[in-house]
Image: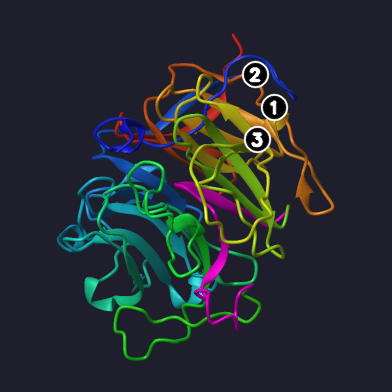
Amino acid sequence: MPKKLCFLLPLILVGCGGSGSGDTAVTLAKQVIASGLSQPMQYKAVPGQPTLAYVVERGGLIKVLVNDVVQSTPLLNLSALLSTAGEGGVLGIAFDPDFTTNRYIYAHFSSGTDVDTTIVRYTVDSSFLTASISSSAPIFKTNQAPYGNHKGGSINFGSDNMLYVALGDGGSSNDPLNRSQDKTTLLGKMLRINPTGDAYPTDPDNNYSIPAGNPFLGDSTVRPEIWSFGLRNPFRWSFDSVLGGFLISDVGQDSYEEVSYVAIVNGGRNFGWRVREGKHAISNSGPTFGTAFTDPFIDYPRSAGRSITGGFVYRGTALPELTGRYFVADFVTNKFWAVPITVVGGEATSITMPSATSITGGLNGTVSIDPDANGEAIVTELSAGRVSRLIPVATP
């Protein structure tokens, strides 16, 4: 297991020092919202409830913040359902597109002795402060045995109201089972599913349908859930409605970290793992699931950064000089970047990594960067056990 992907050691994010295109000289500070958390994994602002947010802890608690204050009663306690072996635990949550009326929340976690990737829907009560385990509705499950790493993390809905699930290759080094290029497995893929239907009525753990327009629908040799493939471990990724596509930060093996942009209309892309890292061919052999590779718009050597955690495109108001930039960080080196992105004709323009952005007080093990209700950046630091809002440095 690569040490950077073990929760007891470093996890998954970006890296790059030195100068690059689009450098902006800016220093940020942190406003700590909550500390003393137990391995926090993700912060999510609650849609339609501007005073509320949820914080996911790896061990199973989903905690409620009211006006940035942690409440004593959690929204959910999933600890009895989990496996925290390897890189397991609760890895991410997503809100249903109609959350303000149906109050559905989706949790992605690891379960089972052989390590299953599991997605379950829960219904939040009308106060938006609690949810009952008994409201659970299983949506998705797939097994990742025999290895304990590369499970992905984020799940998100696109502007098409479909649920997108990015899964890692299932683990070990160099994807020894070549799962990312295997059209018969869901691992190492971005999946597109409809959680309101049921294409598997005899399977109690899988209750979703295959959306029309999935790129391989109708090809009996390919799993129909697959939207794109050739991923290693897309731990944190986001959908940007303004750009109309996905920003996928994929953790490298030994040589390169990478970020790809893919428009929501461009399913079927092959990102190249395990025969490429970033834009670069490596010694692993095929066969490949298709031969045309989609280049990332950023790739950079591991001499510059060790493990990438993707964030989101910033469009808040507190940091106007960073508007429109993609925020990323590095779990190992604790660097942070505000990356310019330009999309022309549905494709992102290739750039080199800009200089790291200075943050007063530094970061410690960033595992997620998410917008709050006002679009401001919230950094979740697993190693420090805290979540913080990025703010301008005060003028003397």
Q: Amino acid at mark 3?
A: Ile
Tag 1 and tag 2, C-beta contact below 8 Å: no
Position above or below: 39 against 16: below
Q: Amino acid at mark 2?
A: Val
Is residue 42 in sight in this rendering? yes
Q: Position of residue 352 (x, y in %)?
A: 69, 27
Indicate the quadrant containing the N terminus: top left, top right, bottom left or bottom right. top left
**What is the distance, in whole Å, between disc 3 and disc 1 at their CAs?**
6 Å
Segment tinted magenta in the rendering: 215-242
Q: Tell me the residue at 50%/67% (across/down).
A: 183
Residue at the disc numbered 3: 298
Question: Decide: marks 3, 1 in contact (CB < 8 A)?
Answer: yes
Q: Is residue 109 above or below residue 319?
A: below
Looking at the image, which is closer to me, 56 or 13?
13
Residue 209 or 156: which is nearer the viewer?
Answer: 209
Q: Main secondary structure of the magenta part?
A: loop
Q: In the figure, residue 135 lies in which quadrant?
A: bottom left
Task: Report helix, strand or loop for mark 3.
Answer: strand
Separation (CA) of disc 1 from disc 2: 18 Å
Q: Earlier in the sequence, mark 3 or mark 1?
A: 3
Q: Position of residue 56 (x, y in %)?
A: 33, 50
Mark 1 surroundings within 10 Å by alpha-carbon count, few (fewer than 14), some (14 through 19), many (20 or more)? some
Return the residue at label 2.
Answer: 26
- Disc 2 packing (10 Å; few <14; some 14–19; many ≥20): some
Q: Secondary structure at mark 2?
A: loop
Q: Which residue is mark 1?
A: 352
Classify residue 33 as left or right of residue 315. left
The picture places residue 44, in percent across and down from the top left corner, at 45, 51
Residue in the foreground of this view, choosing between 251 and 357: 251
